[in-house]
Amino acid sequence: MRIDVVTIFPGYLAPLDEAIVGRARRAGLLDVRVHDLRGWASGVHKAVDDSPYGGGPGMLMTAPVWGAALDEVTGSGDTVPRLLVPTPAGAPLTQERVAGWAREPWLVLACGRYEGIDARVLSDARRRMPVEEVSLGDYVLAGGEVAALVVVEAVSRLVPGVLGNPASAELDSFSDGLLEAPAYTRPERWRDLDVPDVLRGGNHAVVDRWRRDRSLERTAAVRPDLLDALLARHGADAFD
Ligand code: ADE
């Protein structure tokens, strides 16, 4: 899978050389390319921003710079990529969206800074490729780079071959719409706290039931909205 990230802070994406994503890149499973937006800026100052029409605080990233960058990056392969744009104004990031993107051959992430990107950049891109805006949550970051890191990591671990044990992705929180049950490893007793007996008993059916119950309990306590969503989608069968 190919992933391009366009940013004015390429150094922000340095963590993509580390851990699971770094290893997958070195193994040739992921082709991640980070581009400096300023390479498409002109003039002595290489400006990428300007003040907004209609007034208001802050600066906007300009259409000519982003247009040139996206033309070159998105035109450099033999398919059409999906363009992802992190912004607090996007639809929330979910495991379902991540799983869909993990099946794509090519993603391009456009990281905005300041007050965002001139709206015509996405209107224009939509004429040639699928475009999705994505939010990490209801808070405002200084730019899209951290969100791009999150998207790349979440997508990468679902790309076949990237995780040593693909079952770990299937057991994740959210893959069945619930939060994961608490988990334990050795030692059996630590600071007077014991691993629950049922997990040491070796009865897989009983362990599965126990994990499912703890998942439901935790989800009801912390994320009742997830239970509501499951109920709306599957009815009471969701909890069998
Ligand atoms: N850029 C700034 N804030 C953001 C957020 N909450 N999610 C995604 N991108 C952002």
Image (cartoon, helix red, strand yellow):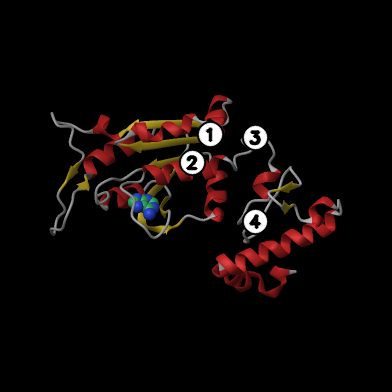
**What kind of element bears circle 4?**
loop
Dot 1 crowding, Cα within 10 Å, few <14, some 14–19, many 20+:
many
State yes or no: Cβ of the residue under disc 4 lies below 8 Å from any atom of ligand 1. Answer: no
**What kind of element bears circle 2?**
helix
| Upstream in sequence: badge 3 or badge 4 | 3
Q: Nearer the viewer, mark 3 or mark 4?
A: 4
Per the model, the C-alpha gap separating discs 4 and 1 is 23 Å
Q: Amino acid at mark 1?
A: Val
Dot 3 crowding, Cα within 10 Å, few <14, some 14–19, many 20+:
few
Quadrant of the drawing holding the N terminus: top right
Q: Taking 193 as reference, is 72 left or right?
A: left
Residue 163 lies, in percent from the top left, at 64, 37
Q: Which residue is mark 3?
A: 161
Q: Is residue 226 visible?
A: no
**What kind of element bears circle 1?**
helix
Query: Residue drawn at (61%, 35%), measured in percent from left and top?
Result: 162
Q: Amino acid at mark 4?
A: Glu
| Upstream in sequence: badge 1 or badge 3 | 1
